[in-house]
Image (tube, rainbow, N blue to C red):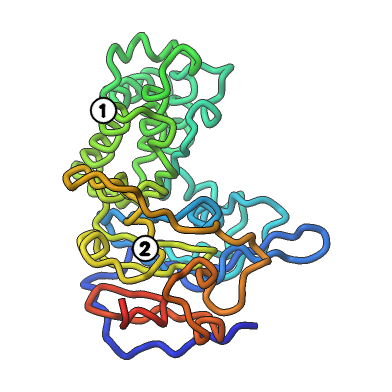
Amino acid sequence: MNAVLKQSHVEPLAQHSDPLISIRGLQVGFDNGQRIVPVLHGIDLDIQSGEAVGIVGESGCGKSVTWLAVLGLLGPKARVSGTVHLDQQAIHHLSGDQLAGIRGKRIAMIFQDPASALNPVHSIGKQLIESLQLHRGLRGQAARAEALRLLDRVHIPNPVERLTCYPHEMSGGTNQRVMIAMALAGEPDLLVADEPTTALDATIQAQILQLLAEIRRDSQMAMALISHDLGVIAEVSDRVLVMYAGRIVEQSSARQLFDSARHPYSRGLLQALPDLAGPRQPLVAIPGSVPEPGRLPSGCSFRPRCQQADAACAMGVPAQRWVERGHQVACLQTASL
């Protein structure tokens, strides 16, 4: 097993209150019939009430798995360890049925493909009212009135007509707004948005991001925004976590990350973005791809793709260390960047 390198002694920023959700040492593996294949390698994450945290990285880095594990949605072949506290109450030991009272009510999750998340054989109204019945006990006219209010809240025109529509009768952007309305039905403390704009065109994407920011501002709801798109992350996030191969490799405020990213992977993601204001030039791609779970290289998982890597990077997994206040990086080469 790789050694974990010693952390620095730079102190983090002081927190003024207990976090809404606190995740410590979250590990996930999947039983493939022959062995347990590790996917997450110890995730530590806090989110404060009202805070928006962006989680970025390529596909296969563990962004979605983190939250599916928290909500107990990974299935029987998953092996999950670590602790999760919601408002200082432990929820990691709860079974799937026990977590049902938390899913949607305290923590809601919306997915990147509303066409597959919505039931095609039930109307929008039936699905939205069912959420209101489950999470808030509303029925009859009270449920219908609240359903109409939620559709209006997410800026869907003609909400009375939309209640009778089926998902295939509406656009992808409208279906995503319906998913947001269903997530808001339980009045959650935390909304986890998993690639909420991936399948949408640029105009609709901007509208959905504006809607999420508006809802968060009005309700003081915390949000975890999962995306591979740094532009989306920059739009709505207070703080950003960069994940690679099942680990957090950098975390800081959004301003710090976009102004002075310190991990080579974070810098590579930023360098792959086009500069709309500057001169036209070829984009710089990160060579290679994310390693498969269970086949990680020795030492730093990013080492085979990193231009700054040296022999020391193969000796052990770098621990996160504070490079400045509010800014953590898991990299041996940080001082030279």
**Considering depth in this image, is 254 or 186 the residue closer to the camera?**
254
Give the amino acid type for the residue marked by disc 2 in the picture: Ser
Of residues 29 and 82, the one drawn nearer to the viewer in this rendering: 29
The residue type indicated by label 1 comes to Arg
Q: Kindly tell me whether residue 115 is visible in this rendering.
A: yes
Identity of the residue drawn at 48% across and 55% down: 63
**Comparing labels 1 and 2, the label whose residue is closer to the camera:** 2
Q: Earlier in the sequence, mark 1 or mark 2?
A: 1
**In the image, which disc is placed on residue 186?**
none
Compute the Cα span from label 1 to label 2. Answer: 36 Å
Coordinates of residue 90 in the picture (x, y in percent): 48, 67
Instruction: List x then y, in percent, for residue 280.
Output: 24, 44
As drawn, the residue found furthest toward the left would be: 277
User: Which residue is disc 2 drawn over?
Assistant: 266
Secondary structure at numbered mark 2: helix
What is the quadrant of residue 322 in the picture? bottom left
The foreground one among 52 and 149 is 52
**In the rendering, which numbered label is found on residue 153?**
1
Query: Looking at the rendering, which quadrant does residue 35 occupy?
Result: bottom right
Judge whether 319 appears above or below 156 on screen. below
